[in-house]
């Protein structure tokens, strides 16, 4: 049976979901997509994402692929999926791709963005998409710490205990930028790959630096210790977006 | 008993509420504010808004006043209210005002904005705040119709049956602007006052003009007929924001 591979982009509000990946407890984005594909095609089809996102984490752009036995017009397919999916999951840019394309393995780099509302009151319309930090953060100190974290390092200090052992905790951070615009602080992280809860650990650590609880000069020592410390906290999921995947 | 009057700004996501004004069925913004004030002060206090908003309508900036028997620091008062209110209602800019200030009667003009997502898929993060219109709208035609509606007119054709009889249906629209930025179309209406469901009627009518269902040249005739017609539809509430109140 010859199959056709399709690639889609997916945006989602993660608030109501137990993350991307199918799991026994809680509804997931992957599950919703596979259900909608089954309703459309009457075939069980596995949807492969570029990677997992945790419970409550959002995606501006997640990328996935799947194979169908029958050829379908990609636009009609996306329209059908969106008609079946809830409004907090939207599919876009459907295309036929060669079977050599793999959403996870073909990814060259990923960008995550973590958004902090640095003020007393998050506007009601952003309340599900921002971490609130009341105390004014020192962005210059955060930028200094980010500068030390950029590049190729062993990030063992910046991952939560993973469910499965990881071969290596060495990763390359191409970018780690901290910017402020009014009350909004954005932490953008670009890399080939990230460890479990690595972006939220980086965001949590940089927030503590911004609060003055940790000095940016301690960053190098925390990194080289390769051990998780209380100075590295895991920032809550609502501020995090999978922002882009490049191939 | 001498009283002190306070003025606050309020932003709210109207999705979960039966509108601004207290009513027997459904939770309202006014009710939430009065409950929070009671918890803070142990006095029943009436909160006066600049005007009502309907079920499901949002506010970027609603303005209200209330009187307290005891003098309170305005900032502490706002902080206390925000601690008691849910995240979809936020209070800001608390100030003491003279008892001559009245949130409704002192208002000089109000601005409403109606937001249309003119495309197939509303981004998940905007789904509660945009009306989706798939068909590409002709913004030039909408602007032409808006031009005719601007100014002082009898807007009887652009109001829903009000609960109570209104003395006059004559109002002045200082501004009625239609703009497009990418997939987003914004209808901004500025006036001294608006009739019941007038902004949603204007937005619904302009949308039908944009779809080509009504010609902009019919606008003057619909206005002068002073009778509601099927060509004027009431646009759904989720796209509407009370944007500003000026004093």
Image: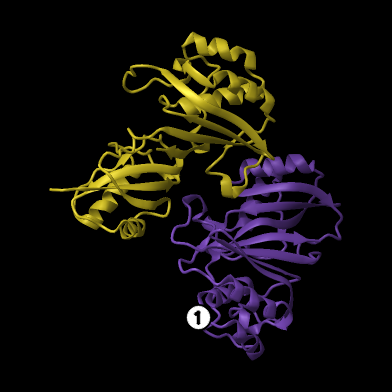
Chain colours: A yellow, B purple
In this view, which residue lies farthest toward the left?
A: A1
Residue B203 in percent (x, y) is at 59, 71
Q: Is residue A77 left or right of residue B24?
A: left
Q: Is residue A236 left or right of residue A64?
A: right
Determine whether A70 is above or below A242 in the image. Answer: below
Q: Is residue A96 visible?
A: yes
Residue at the disc numbered 1:
B213
Residue A225 in percent (x, y) is at 49, 9
Q: How many discs mark residues in the rendered view?
A: 1
Determine whether B47 is above or below A63 in the image. Answer: below
Rendered residue at 71%/49% (across/down): B43
Q: Is residue A43 left or right of residue A168?
A: left
For this rendering, which residue is in front, A2 or B75?
Answer: A2
Element type at marker 1?
A: loop
Q: Is residue B202 visible?
A: no
Determine whether B187 is above or below B89 in the image. Answer: below
For this rendering, which residue is in front, A75 or B211?
Answer: A75
Q: Residues within 10 Å of mark 1 (few under 14, many from 20)?
A: few
Residue B173 in percent (x, y) is at 73, 74
Residue A81 in percent (x, y) is at 33, 55
Rendered residue at 48%/16% (across/down): A153
Quarter of the image for residue A160 reads top left
Q: Is residue A164 left or right of residue B115?
A: left
Determine whether B78 is above or below A167 in the image. Answer: below
Rendered residue at 19%/48% (across/down): A3
Rendered residue at 54%/12% (across/down): A222
Quarter placement of the C terminus of chain A: top left
Subunit ID for the residue under disc 1: B
For this rendering, which residue is in front, B175 or B11?
Answer: B175
């Amino acid at each position: 049976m010859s199959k056709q591979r399709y690639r889609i982009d997916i945006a989602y509000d993660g608030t109501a979901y137990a993350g991307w990946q199918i799991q026994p407890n809680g509804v997931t984005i992957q599950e919703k997509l596979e259900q909608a594909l089954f309703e459309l095609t009457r075939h069980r089809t596995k949807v492969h994402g570029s990677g997992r996102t945790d419970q409550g984490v959002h995606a501006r752009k997640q990328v996935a692929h799947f194979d169908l036995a029958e050829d379908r017009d990609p636009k009609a397919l996306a329209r059908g999926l969106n008609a079946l999916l809830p409004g907090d999951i939207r599919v876009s840019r459907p295309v036929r791709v060669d079977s050599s394309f793999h959403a996870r393995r073909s990814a060259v780099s990923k960008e995550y963005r973590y958004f902090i509302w640095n003020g007393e009151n998050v506007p009601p319309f952003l309340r599900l998409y921002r971490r609130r930090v009341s105390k004014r953060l020192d962005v210059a100190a955060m930028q200094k710490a980010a500068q030390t974290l950029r590049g190729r390092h062993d990030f063992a200090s910046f991952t939560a205990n993973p469910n499965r052992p990881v071969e290596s905790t060495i990763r390359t951070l191409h970018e780690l930028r901290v910017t402020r615009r009014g009350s909004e602080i954005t932490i953008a992280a670009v890399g080939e790959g990230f460890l479990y809860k690595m972006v939220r650990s980086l965001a949590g650590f940089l927030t503590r630096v911004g609060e003055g609880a940790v000095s940016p000069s301690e960053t190098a020592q925390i990194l080289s210790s390769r051990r998780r410390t209380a100075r590295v906290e895991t920032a809550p999921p609502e501020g995090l977006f999978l922002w882009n995947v490049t191939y």
